[in-house]
């Protein structure tokens, strides 16, 4: 059974890679198995998802190409 489970280090790597690319079916299955038994990695996964959502929101809220309006320039 140990052969099928990721170590915590491997699970962290897969969580990070999963943010950048789609994981294969076997990668997702092995990660899900690890997360089902490891609270620390489950917490890490939640934190990474939270950070990704927060950064996505910030990047859409702030438009670096926008010019300040007249009201902002008077201050």
Image: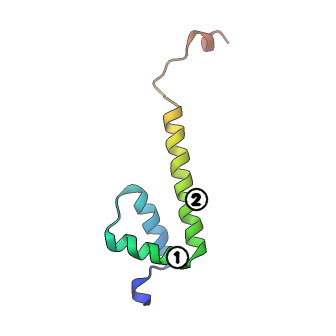
Q: Position of residue 63 (x, y in %)?
A: 49, 28
**Residue 37 percent coordinates (x, y):** 54, 79
Residues packed near mark 1 inside 10 Å, few (<14), some (14 to 19) or many (20 plus): few
Identity of the residue drawn at 43% across and 57% down: 19
**Vertical relation: 45 (above or below) 54:** below
Question: Is 45 on the left-hand or right-hand side of 71?
Answer: left
Residue indicated by mark 2:
47
Q: Is residue 7 above or below residue 65?
A: below
Locate residue 53, reporting x and y percent. 52, 48
| Quadrant position of residue 72 | top right
Is residue 31 toward the left or the right of residue 26 in the image? right
Location of the C terminus by quadrant is: top right
- The outermost residue toward the right is 75
Pointer 2 or 1: first along the chain: 1
- Residue visible at 45% across and 62% down in the picture: 16
The answer to whether 38 appears left or right of 19 in the picture is right
Q: Residue furthest bottom?
A: 1
Say which element carries label 1: helix
Quarter of the image where one finds residue 29: bottom left
Quadrant housing residue 38:
bottom right
Query: Residue at coordinates 35% horizontally, 65% vertically from top-left?
Result: 23
Taking the image as shown, residue 27 lies to the left or right of residue 15, namely left
Which numbered disc covers residue 36? 1
Q: Position of residue 49 (x, y in %)?
A: 52, 56
């Amino acid at each position: 059974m140990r052969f099928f489970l990721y170590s915590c280090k491997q699970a962290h790597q897969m969580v990070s890679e999963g943010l950048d690319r789609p994981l294969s079916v076997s990668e997702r299955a092995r990660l899900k198995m690890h997360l089902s038994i490891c609270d620390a990695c489950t917490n890490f996964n939640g934190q990474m998802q939270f950070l990704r959502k927060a950064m996505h929101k910030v990047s859409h809220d702030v438009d670096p190409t926008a010019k300040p309006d007249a009201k902002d320039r008077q201050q």
